[in-house]
Image (spheres, rainbow, N blue to C red):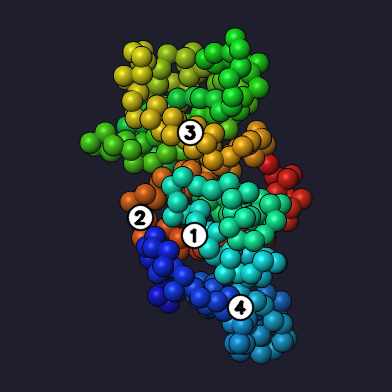
Amino acid sequence: MEIFKGENLIEFTERFKTDEDCKNYLADLKWSAGYVCRKCKHDKSSIRKDFSRCCTRCKDVETPTANTLFHKVKFGIRKAFMIAFEMTASTKGMSDSQLAKRYGISRPTAWLFTKKIRIAMQSSQRIEMKGDIQVDEFVVGGHETGKQGRSYDTKKAKAICAIELTKNQGIKRVYIQSIDDYSSSSLKGIFEAHISQTAQVTKDQWRGYGPLAKEYQIKQLKSAGGKNFIQIHTIIHQVKSWIRTTFAHVSKGHIQRYFDEYCFRINRSIYKETIFHKLIERVVAEKHFSYQQIKISS
């Protein structure tokens, strides 16, 4: 198949003019390694007009969207493609209310679908961060009187960010995790998920990182008014501004999904040509999630 490349909206709408164009794209991805019947495991099928596959043995019909995150999308696959394109091509993002108005769907429908897309955007955790790493914690939320720094009783959402630097001190990769508190056990999560034990990790002098130094190579420095951590403070400022200016409210239960969306885009900033295609690959590979399952998993 010829994959879609680029961020040009006109080219995108020319490529995907109808639902059938989108279904054809999904079918090519879904059965790129060959067809196997989901019921009888037979490997021969006929192709229908809507690009569904019909098993020649048991006659089971499987649609391109079946058991993917596009499963039972009720507002049309082309609209779903366009929303996914917006979420990859736009660095500023769009709120569910904006998407609902733009595509003529209800806000709850937009909310559910964007949550599914963000599930596909979560890290696979297959590639560890190595080399020079910076780590820092931050909070997301409005102003609270008397709550500064690492306040344990704040109502704000707490998070930890890790960035991998290039040889020229640019930003190579970013991962962000929601945390319950600033204890060593909570901070360790991002290390276990994303950071190699051979990496050189630089951190400020918060004592919660002390126990982690037994397993990871951690160097703690004074912040010096942020001068020693310019890159990670820039990323933290960007993600906080994006969430605050785009979304009216993000609950603690769902904020990890927004972190996943931000990291998915920034980690592919040099691969923007194929970012939409990579997302659709994940949407096809990810199993269908219902509304209740999304609520429970958050």
Residue assigned mark 2: 271
Q: Give the mark toward the camera: 2 or 3.
A: 3
- Does 77 sit above or below residue 117? below
Q: Residues within 10 Å of mark 3 (few under 14, many from 20)?
A: some
Residue assigned mark 1: 85
Q: Residue at x 69, y 81 (%)?
A: 61
The kind of residue on which mark 4 rests is Val
Residue at mark 4 to residue at mark 3: CA–CA distance: 46 Å
**Callout 4 secondary element:** loop
Q: Along the polypeptide, which appears first: circle 1 or circle 3?
A: 1
**Figure quadrant of the C terminus:** top right
**Callout 2 secondary element:** helix
Q: Along the polypeptide, which appears first: circle 4 or circle 2?
A: 4
In this rendering, the count of numbered labels is 4
- Residues at circles 4 and 2 in contact by the CB criterion of under 8 Å: no
Q: Is residue 201 visible?
A: no
Residue assigned mark 4: 36
Front residue of this view, candidates 67 and 247 = 247
